[in-house]
Amino acid sequence: MKLKGNVTLITGGGQGIGRSIALLFAEEGSDIAICDVNPDSLNQTKDEIKEKNRDCLTFTADVTKFDQVEDVVNKILDKFGRIDILVNNAGITRDSLLVRMSEEDWDRVLDVNLKGSFNCTKAVAKPMMKARGGKIINIASIIGIIGNPGQANYAASKGGMIALTKTMAKELASRNVRVNAIAPGFIKTAMTEKLSEDVKGAMLKEIPLSRFGEQGDVANIALFLAGEDSSYITGHVIQVDGGMVM
Ligand code: NAP
């Protein structure tokens, strides 16, 4: 077991990539805390984690609200006395071309994806620094590297997460807190399910490995970054995109 004795907080962990990371980390021995805005999916994931004989705390909390995030982190510390790994995974899209994009859609995507990551990182940084150890994994996107028409808000938020990753890696390295990002390409989840067949077909043509990614493809890299196999890696962005961007 690669994460035995660890405690992991995963945001947006009720479904999709976050859920897959939660289940894999539980299999690898970590106790799990997940926060999400959807209590139904939270409860379902909690049951699945309990079946793996790990402790699981769930919180209906919005990562855009610092007071809610701070409360989540304090409750994890009360229960487990530590927090070893944070996965900033909660994310949304609100796509449209820039000239049609509302201020509300811009603000919401930046709030959830980027400010949410700032809030959670800030809340765990002190306990991790005090413990002289921790791992923070930011789920960014290749769109934050290459941009994409119709996703100005999303691309800016994910590019911001990559810049946040590098800055936090530099700020926290002296306390043995490693900060890395994963930039997935097209992964099969509810987020990509809503895209039209035309868009999916066009994207598939851009993927040298000729398949869309599975949630487990991202979870496996998160496990690598959370464990000791990556102990000399910080400030890095690992693309999980089937070769789409190279
Ligand atoms: P998903 O299935 O939509 O899961 C995202 C989860 O985050 C949902 O459970 C969602 O709840 C939750 N969430 C949304 N707003 C939240 C908030 N304010 N506070 C807490 N939780 C919140 O998406 P996914 O595809 O697994 O994506 C996970 C991450 O990977 C995202 O950051 C996404 O940008 C990134 N990513 C995904 C892909 C892909 O191809 N799927 C590619 C690149 C990057 P609700 O559903 O109730 O809103």
Image (cartoon, rainbow, N blue to C red):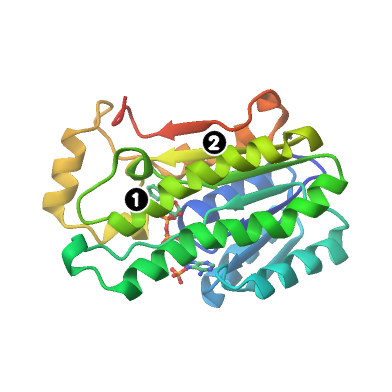
Residue 45: quarter of image: bottom right
Residue 124 in the figure: left or right of residue 151: right
One can see residue 51 in this view:
no
Identify the image quadrant of the N terminus.
top right
Residue 74: quarter of image: bottom right
Distance Cα–Cα, label 2 vs label 1: 24 Å
Q: Residue at x 40, y 41 (%)?
A: 184
**Regarding mark 2 in the picture, which secondary structure is present there?**
helix
Amino acid beneath label 1 = Ala
Residue 83 in the figure: left or right of residue 225: right
Query: For ligand 1, which image quadrant applies?
Result: bottom left
Q: Position of residue 139 (x, y in %)?
A: 50, 47
Q: Which residue is mark 2?
A: 220
Q: Are marks 2 and 1 in contact (CB under 8 Å)?
A: no
Q: Position of residue 151 (x, y in %)?
A: 27, 55
Please tell me how crowded label 2 is: few (under 14), some (14-19), or many (20+) other residues with Cα within 10 Å: some
Q: Residue at x 46, y 37 (%)?
A: 217
Amino acid beneath label 2 = Asn
Of the numbered discs 2 and 1, the one sitting upstream in the chain is: 1
- Please tell me whether residue 46 is drawn above or below residue 65 in the rendered image: above
- Please tell me whether residue 58 is drawn above or below residue 182 in the rendered image: below
Q: Position of residue 174 (x, y in %)?
A: 78, 33
Q: Position of residue 180 (x, y in %)?
A: 58, 37
**Regarding mark 1 in the picture, which secondary structure is present there?**
helix
Please tell me how crowded label 1 is: few (under 14), some (14-19), or many (20+) other residues with Cα within 10 Å: many
Question: Toward the viewer: 103 or 77?
Answer: 103
Q: Residue 155: which disc?
A: 1
